[in-house]
């Protein structure tokens, strides 16, 4: 017996969950498939930020200082596997090209329509799922160790405000101390992005969305994306519940998107920026009121349900290469200078892989050469942020409705 549905969604990370929920909210039957459980991969371990301010996606640094520092491969912020360079170099070169000031500004203009709707769309889904309580509306803080960094970042924030209306507050060291009394009083202040929200358990939010999806009649099934094949009228996939037959399929496999796209003949320039996390109990009475980014060192501290989560910057390495959590080892003592952390809580560092494209824009829209196949991946540093608006956009395109934003910049055929 096969399982028939209108749309099969491959990948139950936060992006796939939001696509599936939006389809089901439109009354379009969907089956959500993953080889594991809901949000047990990349979407499990992020810093939990819904970055309403992030109108400029993270670019490759263009200043010589930073390039030399990264090339030496000793920072906490960026790490690479030297032996993997020949494999990664073509991606890095394209990424570097797209990061030039003018191109980056043009990319931001295409990215901003998604970012501007990111939080409102999560709030709508959270309401529908009865999970509003999981969204914290405190914004987040970029900490400054030096006046130079402070001046640079505040000037940048002012530009973003002028160009896109993004809100922020500049905090001097005294105002920062009032917001975060347990941070060591050694900082030159902070930039408070006031609009973003954060989630103390990103998987819990996804589980709430997935539960709503199932209440609306959606099915969650264990299945295997690599078995996807075309049939006369649509798509077929092997699953633990038997074969799934669907009119349409959505690929929301995050860093594993190539498992499907390569088999179908697409050569998309995908790569990953890997990242690690570790949890710590805060010592004594200490607590963090916001997610904080120590940008000059290159890590985040996020107050999470399990404890304080330290998340690391970008590691350029093949997705499946052995783990090398050197960035965590470099960041941890610097974090302890700022905030009183107890010993590590997790037996080993968690590893995730941000699914990236060289032009910093996600791939959302129709597959160029296959009917009734849709792509929704490549959300890089902002997959949690953009999941809800991506879900809405994809569901509207699948249903043939007017889309919430113009999807043209995100189409796969731009490559
Ligand atoms: C350290 C770190 C910090 C981050 N912080 C933030 C943040 O604060 N805010 C933010 O917005 N983003 C953040 N991100 C990025 C964000 O986590 C990702 O962009 C997002 O999780 C990607 O979601 P996804 O659904 O596309 O992929 P995933 O969550 O990886 O989901 C893909 C799914 O596909 C499934 N799958 C894979 N292969 C198969 C197969 N063969 N068959 C069936 N299923 C399969 C997997 O099991 C997985 O569930 C961070 C990332 C990292 C690593």
Image (spheres, rainbow, N blue to C red):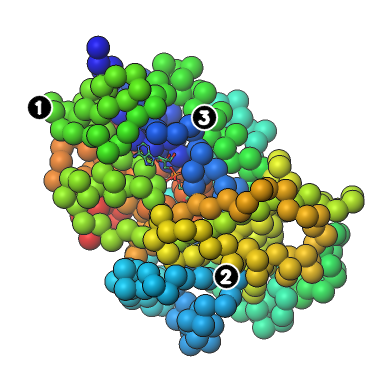
Alpha-carbon span between mark 1 and mark 2:
49 Å
Alpha-carbon span between mark 3 and mark 1:
33 Å
Earlier-in-chain disc, 1 versus 2: 2
| As drawn, 387 above or below 282 | above
Q: Residue furthest left?
A: 232
Q: Name the secondary structure under disc 1.
A: loop
Earlier-in-chain disc, 2 versus 3: 2
User: Residue 322 appears at what percent x and percent y?
Assistant: 47, 58
Q: Which is closer to the viewer, label 3 or label 1?
A: 1
Marks 2 and 3 in Cβ contact (< 8 Å) = no
Neighbor class of circle 2 (other Cα within 10 Å; few <14, some 14-19, many 20+) is many
Residue at figure coordinates x 65%, y 36% from the top left = 134
Residue 39 has which mark? none
Earlier-in-chain disc, 3 versus 1: 3
Disc 2: which residue: 77
Residue at figure coordinates x 30%, y 56% from the top left = 409
Residue situated in front as seen by the camera: 315 or 81? 81
Disc 3: which residue: 209
Q: Name the secondary structure under disc 3.
A: helix
Residue at figure coordinates x 32%, y 58% from the top left = 270
Q: Is residue 108 left or right of residue 79?
A: left
Disc 1: which residue: 232
Ligand 1 within 8 angstroms of badge 3 C-beta = no
Residue at figure coordinates x 25%, y 57% from the top left = 268
User: Residue 38 appears at what percent x and percent y?
Assistant: 49, 33
């Amino acid at each position: 017996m096969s399982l028939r549905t209108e749309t099969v969604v491959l990948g139950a990370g936060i992006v796939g969950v939001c696509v599936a929920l939006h389809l089901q909210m439109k009354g379009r039957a969907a089956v959500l498939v993953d080889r594991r459980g809901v949000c047990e991969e990349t979407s499990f371990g992020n810093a939990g930020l819904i970055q309403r301010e992030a109108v400029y996606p993270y670019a490759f640094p263009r200043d010589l200082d930073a390039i030399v520092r990264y090339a030496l491969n000793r920072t906490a912020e960026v790490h690479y596997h030297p032996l993997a360079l020949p494999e990664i170099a073509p991606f890095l070169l394209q990424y570097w090209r797209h990061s030039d000031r003018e191109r980056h500004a043009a990319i931001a203009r295409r990215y901003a329509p998604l970012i501007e709707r990111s939080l409102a769309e999560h709030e709508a889904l959270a309401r529908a799922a009865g999970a509003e309580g999981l969204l914290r509306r405190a914004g987040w803080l970029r900490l400054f160790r030096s006046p130079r960094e402070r001046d640079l970042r505040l000037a940048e924030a002012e530009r973003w405000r002028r160009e896109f209306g993004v809100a922020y507050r500049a905090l001097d060291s005294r105002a920062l101390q009032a917001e975060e009394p347990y941070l060591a009083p050694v900082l030159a202040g902070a930039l408070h992005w006031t609009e973003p929200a954060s989630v103390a358990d990103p998987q819990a939010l996804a589980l709430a969305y997935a539960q709503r999806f199932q209440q609306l009649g959606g099915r969650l099934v264990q299945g295997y994306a690599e078995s996807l094949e075309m049939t006369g009228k649509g798509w077929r996939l092997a699953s633990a519940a038997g074969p799934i037959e669907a009119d349409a399929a959505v690929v929301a496999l995050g860093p594993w998107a190539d498992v499907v796209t390569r088999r179908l003949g697409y050569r998309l320039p995908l790569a990953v920026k890997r990242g690690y996390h570790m949890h710590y109990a805060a010592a004594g009475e200490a607590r963090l009121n916001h997610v904080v980014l120590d940008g000059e060192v290159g890590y985040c501290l996020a107050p999470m349900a399990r404890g304080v989560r330290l998340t690391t910057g970008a590691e350029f390495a093949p997705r499946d290469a052995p783990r090398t959590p050197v960035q965590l080892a470099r960041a941890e003592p610097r974090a302890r200078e700022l905030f009183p952390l107890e010993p590590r809580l997790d037996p080993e560092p968690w590893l995730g892989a941000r699914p990236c494209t060289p032009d910093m824009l996600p791939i959302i829209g129709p597959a160029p050469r296959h009917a009734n196949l849709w792509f929704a991946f490549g959300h890089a540093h902002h997959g949690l942020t953009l999941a809800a608006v991506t879900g809405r956009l994809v569901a509207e395109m699948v249903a043939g409705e007017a889309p919430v934003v113009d999807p043209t910049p995100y189409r796969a055929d731009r490559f």
